[in-house]
Image (cartoon, helix red, strand yellow):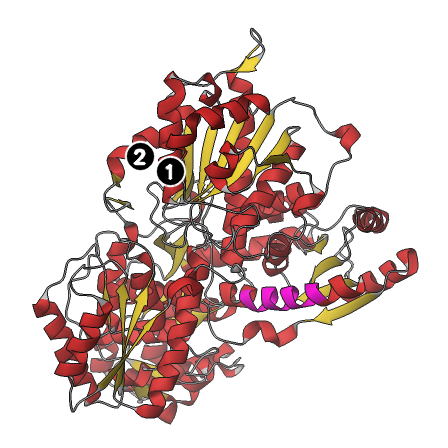
Amino acid sequence: MNAAVRAVVRMGIYVKAKVYFVYEGYQGMVDGGDNIVEVSWESVSSILQVGGTVIGSARCKSFRTHEGRLQAAYNLVQRGITNLCVIGGDGSLTGANLFREEWSGLLEELAQNGKIDAEAVKKYAYLNIVGMVGSIDNDFCGTDMTIGTDSALHRIIEVVDAIMTTAQSHQRTFVLEVMGRHCGYLALVSALACGADWVFIPEYPPEEGWEDTMCVKLSENRARKKRLNIIIVAEGAIDCHNKPITSEKVKDLVVQRLGFDTRVTILGHVQRGGTPSAFDRILASRMGVEAVLALLEATPATPACVVSLSGNQAVRLPLMECVQMTQEVQKAMDEGRFLEAVRLRGKSFENNLNTYKLLAHKIPDAELPKTNFNVAVLNVGAPAAGMNAAVRAAVRVGITEGHKMFAVIDGFEGFAKGKIKEISWGDVGGWTGQGGSILGTKRTLPAKYLEKIAEQMRTNNINALMVIGGFEAYLGLLELSAAREKYDEFCVPMIMVPATVSNNVPGSDFSIGADTALNTITDTCDRIKQSASGTKRRVFIIETMGGYCGYLANMGALAAGADAAYIFEEQFDIRELQANVEHLTEKMKTSIQRGLVLRNENCNENYTTDFIYQLYSEEGKGVFDCRKNVLGHMQQGGAPSPFDRNFGTKISAKAMQWISKKLKETYRKEPGKVFANTEDSVCLLGMRRRNLVFQPVAELKSETDFVHRIPKEQWWLKLRPLMKILAKYKTSYDVSDSGQLEHVAMLPKEAVPAAI
């Protein structure tokens, strides 16, 4: 919430508006006085990394009464406030909408009571409202991701990872209760992200006799040498008769039926606290700026709107349509229309549920279809967190579809050396939370091993390839498809899933691993800023990875609240460096006496990190001193973030289903083999704005700068001005892409949202 507060204040001041804080939610609006205060640029400094909200929040009974709202209107008119930005859940937003509808009536009543004059009634005739949804449950329809959800998932996953190690040692079963009274999003996504054995959510209660089914599944897992079981329960979980299923009930059941050593952990308010994740900070900053733009463009005729995210795009939706749809879900659940409830939750929720069902429970071998196809999976390029989750999903979906799955060790180099083995369902258990690449990965390209790779594909009768990796994987697929003329073995369906911390693969807005790296950078910057607050007047120069791609530097700067970010895509010269130094010198005169500058490792061959450090040190003499920090390979390590685990799992499952479809299409009865040599049989599956899209790699060539290994056009460059505005630079902000008001039902049905 603080990132959103900061963005609204700074964007408001940037467009020359007066900005006020209302402390303690609606209670503060009703009480007035010191609860409504004009704020300055510095008021929101250093709040980006703070959890909770610095302006306080409170449930307010008096705002529900007519008298309370009358008093609130009086307090706002006194200060000439006619634009409200509300950050909260559906209750807060519904209240705001009612307030807006009553506004002119309230003013007339105040005039009759002699509290305000007729002039004021005319001058402040309309109230504009824009909402941002802040709720860890992600229970608001029309938005993929609410502010706070990703951070709550971080808390849950940290706990689950810690519990898994102890459960593994003691061969225990753990029942974890997570928040979500009316919405199972947190439970479902954390179950998907940690590979839980069973999950209970309110929208999709288990079928009659679930007790037996669950116990059979748990004992089967133990029989497969799995030393632990994790069961996740949403606090609002119910059975199909709308009776609650509690974590204690589940524990007692497991103990009575199976005699397993079982423990319950209730996460409670831990999930609401802690530092916000990089995703949440960027989301809230984008939403805050969009909210100010929406208020500026609002007219008395436009309905109150919420700004939200669909896929990777900021959109505006009518507030009451979203609220109605959110209430529809609850109604459907109360009436036992559970499939309808899942559908109303949106495509993203439905997709999560289907993927979980696919991956959590193994179908008995006897019931599996047999396709006689062999599919190989390999990792290529540098390691990225989330690769293992992608391999797990590919292997399990492949087995479910009836294929024989093979794992290639050490990329194309290992492939050429024959390091290839069949991999089973159980082999990939527990992989989602592992960082790095368990299969091993190399940057080597296949061109010099074509003969040997073809031979291995022939020997092992490989009918399809799935490559999980970065830019090398993309180049590798281009080389293999070019070699099809010479080697028939490469005339098979091949698909690439982008996984690289640099996020520099053409055809996709996001790559697996980039979110984890971004969180590492953000955490490190937070610590560095904290160290600077003690010494005062210090500027840190921080070098990030990314090759020539400035994604990590730019987004890291946005998430950490940096003063500047130097990237290759936006050329800079000595004048710009000079301007940045002067900007920091000015900043040191205010109460914010520290600076943070990020530099992408390859942004300029002559203006190196050392050069920039020395320049700042010299120019800042007597005003500030400098330190530098190269983050290096810590950006590639660490446990994958919830976003990367889920993105990896979902995108990889989808890629595997594409392989199955292509295998059916390209199988020739005579001579009894797969033959695919068209361009659309070598694809990259990427996230584009709102959808997951399959794109032939040949078509992506024209979009690629091969010299610098980056896409020619990158969506995140549009967020550059955002970072500069929030760091107090004068710049122009392109609003052509900002949201037009859409309708909830109009969101494309086929969209598979990225925000996870």
Displayed quadrant of residue 367: top right
Q: Residue at x 39, y 84 (%)?
A: 530
Q: Principal SS element in the magenta part? A: helix
Q: Residue furthest top?
A: 670
Q: Position of residue 59 (x, y in %)?
A: 53, 79
Say which element carries label 1. Answer: helix
For disc 2, the marked residue is 700
Label 2 vs 1, first from the N-terminus:
1
Q: Which mark is residue 45?
A: none
Tell me the kind of residue under disc 1. Tyr
Q: Residue at x 61, y 49 (%)?
A: 341
Q: Position of residue 626 (x, y in %)?
A: 24, 82
Quarter of the figure that contains the N terminus: bottom left
Q: Is residue 296 magenta?
A: no
Q: Nearer the viewer, mark 2 or mark 1?
A: 1
State whether residue 378 is above or below residue 65.
above
Displayed quadrant of residue 609: bottom left
Say which element carries label 2. Answer: helix
Image position of 474 (left or right of 611)? right
State whether residue 199 is above or below residue 520.
above
Q: Position of residue 319 (x, y in %)?
A: 42, 59
**Range of the magenta residues?**
154-165
Tell me the kind of residue under disc 2. Leu
Q: Position of residue 123 (x, y in %)?
A: 21, 76
For disc 1, the marked residue is 474
In this view, the residue in front, 167 or 83, is: 167
Q: CA distance from mark 2 to mark 1?
A: 10 Å
- Contact check, label 2 and label 1, Cβ < 8 Å: yes
Image position of 7 (left or right of 676)? left
In this view, the residue in front, 736 or 150, is: 150
State whether residue 432 is above or below residue 494.
below
